Image: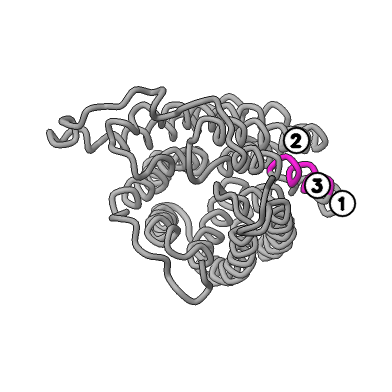
């Protein structure tokens, strides 16, 4: 995964990119038109549902994605419940990271792994703690967003050729729970970076621990290799710094309403096209998307202070995630 070369193509991704873009843009546009844009920003987080099992036939995704949506809603619910106490939120970050990693690795969920469960937990706690949105309304909006994204992902079933594919048993789609040596190592790394990341976050800013841990978990990914950890850490740090600059430029335009919905949809579409080919390039678009979405939900869109904080948190988390890769034996080394 070089900084200066694209990875080989892994098949067409425009359909997944379109689904993700619709999942994030439509809720914002619809809720803006009816006068409740804040609920649209929350529902847009449900678009994370369609990012899983992207290479599987839609008939198989129909069985997998409800578990993803349930995990996202559960993570958000826990974040909302603990939002009033920064210490409890920090403990929750560790719990959600470890539990979601155990489920993702144990049942071979595949990329993007436990990352979005951690981020949804942290974002939910952050939004509830800094905005007047009622907890039940927040959870309902997120669940509605997950449901909408699921329906978007199922749209290809309207085509006869999609229905002709035989669905595989759920036990085959999500085999487990079982852990290989690699998956056990990945789980141990997630647990370690979650605990250390929270401790570092308590020093830096207790309200930002989820971003530090999320950055570390993103670097760990689903690949059990020392070299991959170092490369992903470098990609994440550089991509986030450049992405914060892109956010600063976009923030000058003060996007809102339908314009913001279109902008976020375009960013999400681009991310899904490039993320499997160049991680740093994808982060150039991921960073402004998350900052714009979070800023819109909390009312501080355009804040350069937030952008700087995200850079600091990402550098700390990415370095932590990359360092945890040293727990893997060197390529070719005997493991006993």
In the displayed image of the protein, which residue is found farthest to the left? 160
Image spot of residue 88 (x, y percent) = 79, 32
Magenta stretch, overall SS = helix
Image spot of residue 52 (x, y percent) = 43, 41
Describe residue 131's horizontal placement relative to residue 258 as left or right: right
- Front residue of 132/239: it is 239
Residue on which the image places disc 1: 203
Image spot of residue 189 (x, y percent) = 70, 45
- Front residue of 328/207: it is 328
- Front residue of 232/159: it is 232
Residue on which the image places disc 3: 196
Disc 2 crowd rating (10 Å Cα; few below 14, some 14-19, many 20+) is many
Image quarter (top left, top right, bottom left or bottom right) of the C terminus: top right
Which residue: 37% across, 50% down?
A: 21
Inter-mark Cα distance, 1 to 3: 11 Å
Residue on which the image places disc 2: 89
* Numbered disc in front, either 3 or 2: 3
**Residue range of the region highlighted in magenta in the rendering:** 190-199
Q: Is residue 15 above or below residue 129?
A: below
């Amino acid at each position: 995964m070089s900084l200066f070369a694209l990875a080989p193509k892994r098949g067409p991704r425009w359909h997944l990119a379109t689904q993700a873009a619709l999942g994030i843009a439509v809720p914002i546009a619809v809720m803006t038109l009816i006068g409740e844009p804040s609920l649209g920003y929350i529902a847009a987080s449900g678009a994370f549902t369609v990012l899983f099992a992207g290479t599987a036939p839609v008939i198989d995704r129909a069985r997998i994605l409800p578990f993803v949506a349930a995990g996202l809603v559960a993570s958000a619910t826990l974040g909302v419940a603990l939002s009033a106490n920064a210490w409890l939120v920090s403990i929750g970050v560790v719990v959600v990271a470890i539990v979601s990693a155990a489920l993702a690795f144990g049942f071979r969920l595949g990329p993007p792994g436990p990352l979005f469960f951690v981020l949804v937990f942290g974002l939910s706690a952050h939004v509830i703690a800094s905005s007047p949105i009622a907890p039940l309304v927040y959870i309902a909006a997120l669940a509605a967003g997950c449901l909408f994204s699921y329906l978007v992902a199922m749209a290809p079933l309207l085509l006869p050729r999609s229905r002709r594919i035989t669905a595989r048993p759920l036990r085959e789609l999500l085999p487990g729970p079982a852990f290989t040596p690699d998956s056990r190592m990945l789980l141990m790394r997630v647990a370690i970076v979650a605990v250390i990341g929270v401790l570092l976050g308590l020093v830096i800013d207790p309200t930002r621990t989820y971003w530090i841990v999320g950055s570390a978990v993103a670097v760990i990914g689903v690949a059990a290799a020392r070299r991959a950890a170092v490369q992903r850490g470098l990609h994440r740090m550089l991509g986030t710094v450049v992405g914060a600059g892109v956010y600063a430029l976009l923030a000058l335009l003060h996007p809102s309403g339908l314009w913001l919905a279109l902008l976020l949809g375009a960013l999400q579409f681009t991310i899904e096209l490039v993320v499997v080919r160049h991680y740093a390039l994808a982060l150039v678009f991921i960073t402004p998307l998350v900052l714009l979405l979070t800023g819109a939900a909390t009312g501080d869109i355009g804040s350069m202070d937030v952008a700087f904080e995200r850079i600091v948190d990402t550098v700390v988390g990415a370095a932590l995630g990359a360092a945890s890769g040293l727990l893997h034996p060197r390529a070719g080394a005997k493991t006993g």
